[in-house]
């Protein structure tokens, strides 16, 4: 568990208050950061804050400004900005409960682990956790953290609870504006059955450890090679094939059947069909050989 909680306070459900601690449930991945280097000298490039027509300026002379019209700014200093930040009330009041499927996944932003602050809080904490689990509900409320107010959800997770900050409605683009051009025709039933079979075949339990950021791994490998004076042949895996997507229903059907494999019954039915074709080909090859002796006398007469 992290040494310092991200937030300390209490979850309030009506007249019941549960002291809790909140810890960030995620951490930054193994990203690769680059610096800009002046190649001739090998020195790192620095950035200066400049004003057009004036040049470099002191940091003390810089204030924040909001552009309300083209070239027109409202200037704000740090004290004014700090003055409107919300104080953390140290209380998350659960004001509403919804079914777990009611909230679209696109609204969830960042998860946090919630644990009881002490032994005295554990009993009430467990009651809330199990009540949420049994009812399949998610608790909603608003919480001020570090000067900003968030909409948050609370749900059961293992022995504890998970709190997730949610995006506000105006932070999410409406899906209709992107999906309206997609046709609403019903798919071919056979294609749908094949696709469903393929999904069933590949269904399993989610294990995050099975997935790796291959781009980061490749960058690390490239950096190690460069450190050792080696070079990487970037054309090794640069196969340029044809578009794997079928151009028509027949291609899609064949691709789905091939993906499912012999277990589907579709692939197994094709194997016996090849044998008669092979025999027919063999017979056709023998026919010219049988006619050859008949042609030989014709050449002698000439």
Image (spheres, rainbow, N blue to C red):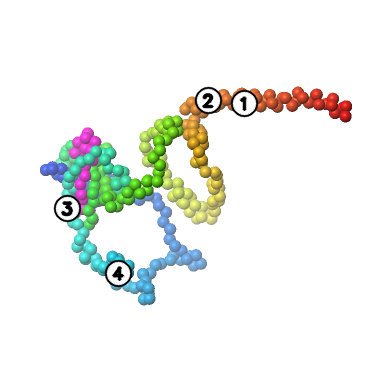
Question: Circle 1: is it few (<14), some (14-19), or many (20+) Cα within 10 Å?
Answer: few
Q: Distance between the Cα atoms at labels 2 and 3?
A: 69 Å
Mark 4: secondary structure: strand
Tell me the element at label 2.
Answer: loop
**Left or right of 205, for residue 8:** left
Which residue is at 48% across, 54% downward? 223
Q: Residue at x 44, y 65 (%)?
A: 44
Question: Is residue 201 in view?
Answer: no
* First in sequence: mark 2 vs mark 3: 3
Residue 180 showing in the rendered view: yes
Kindly identify which residue carries mark 1.
277
Number of other residues with Cα within 10 Å of mark 3, as a class: few under 14, some 14 to 19, many 20 or more: few
Label 4 or label 3, whichever comes before in sequence order: 4
| Place of residue 18 in the rendered image (x, y in percent of width and height, measured from the top left) | 16, 43
Judging depth in this view, the residue of 50 and 124 nearest the camera is: 50
Query: Whole-percent x and y of residue 173?
Result: 32, 50
Q: Which mark is residue 72?
A: 4
Crowd rating for badge 2 (residues with CA inside 10 Å; few <14, some 14–19, many 20+):
few
Upstream in the sequence, badge 2 or badge 1? Answer: 2
Q: Residue 245's x, y, as percent?
A: 49, 41
- Residue placed under numbered mark 2 in the picture: 269
Residue sitting nearer the eye, 42 or 295: 295
User: Total label count?
Assistant: 4
Magenta segment range?
A: 128-146
Report the residue marked by disc 3.
89
SS state under label 3: loop
Label whose residue precedes the other's in the sequence (1 or 4) = 4
The dot on residue 205 is: none
Task: Identify the residue at image location x=24%, y=65%.
Answer: 78
Marks 2 and 1, how far apart at CA: 14 Å
Is the residue under label 1 in contact with that under label 3 (CB below 8 Å)? no
As measured in the structure, the alpha-carbon distance from the residue carrying label 4 to the one carrying label 3 is 36 Å
């Amino acid at each position: 568990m992290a040494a310092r909680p991200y937030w300390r306070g209490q979850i309030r459900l009506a007249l019941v208050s549960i002291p809790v601690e909140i810890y960030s449930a995620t951490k930054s991945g193994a990203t690769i950061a680059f610096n800009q280097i002046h190649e001739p000298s090998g020195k790192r490039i620095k950035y200066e804050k400049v004003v057009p027509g004036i040049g470099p300026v002191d940091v003390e002379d810089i204030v924040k400004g909001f552009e309300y019209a083209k070239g027109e700014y409202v200037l704000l200093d740090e004290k004014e900005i700090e003055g409107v930040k919300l104080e953390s009330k140290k209380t998350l009041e659960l004001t509403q409960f919804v079914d777990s499927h009611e909230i679209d996944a696109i609204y969830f932003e960042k998860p946090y682990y919630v644990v009881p602050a002490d032994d005295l809080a554990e009993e009430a904490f467990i009651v809330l956790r199990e009540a949420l689990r049994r009812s399949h509900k998610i608790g909603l409320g608003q919480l001020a953290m570090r000067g900003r107010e968030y909409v948050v959800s609370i749900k059961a997770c293992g022995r504890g609870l998970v709190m997730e900050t949610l995006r506000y409605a105006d932070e999410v683009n409406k899906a209709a504006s992107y999906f309206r051009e997609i046709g609403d025709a019903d798919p071919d039933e056979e294609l749908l059955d094949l696709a469903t079979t393929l999904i069933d075949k590949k269904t399993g339990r989610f294990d995050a450890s099975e997935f790796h950021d291959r781009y980061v791994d490749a960058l690390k490998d490239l950096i190690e090679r460069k450190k050792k004076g080696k070079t990487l042949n970037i054309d090794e895996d640069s196969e340029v094939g044809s578009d794997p997507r079928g151009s028509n229903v027949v291609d899609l059907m064949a691709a789905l059947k091939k993906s499912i494999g012999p277990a589907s019954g579709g692939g197994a039915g094709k194997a016996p069909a090849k044998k008669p074709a092979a025999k027919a080909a063999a017979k056709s090859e023998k026919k010219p050989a049988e006619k050859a002796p008949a042609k030989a006398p014709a050449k002698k007469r000439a």
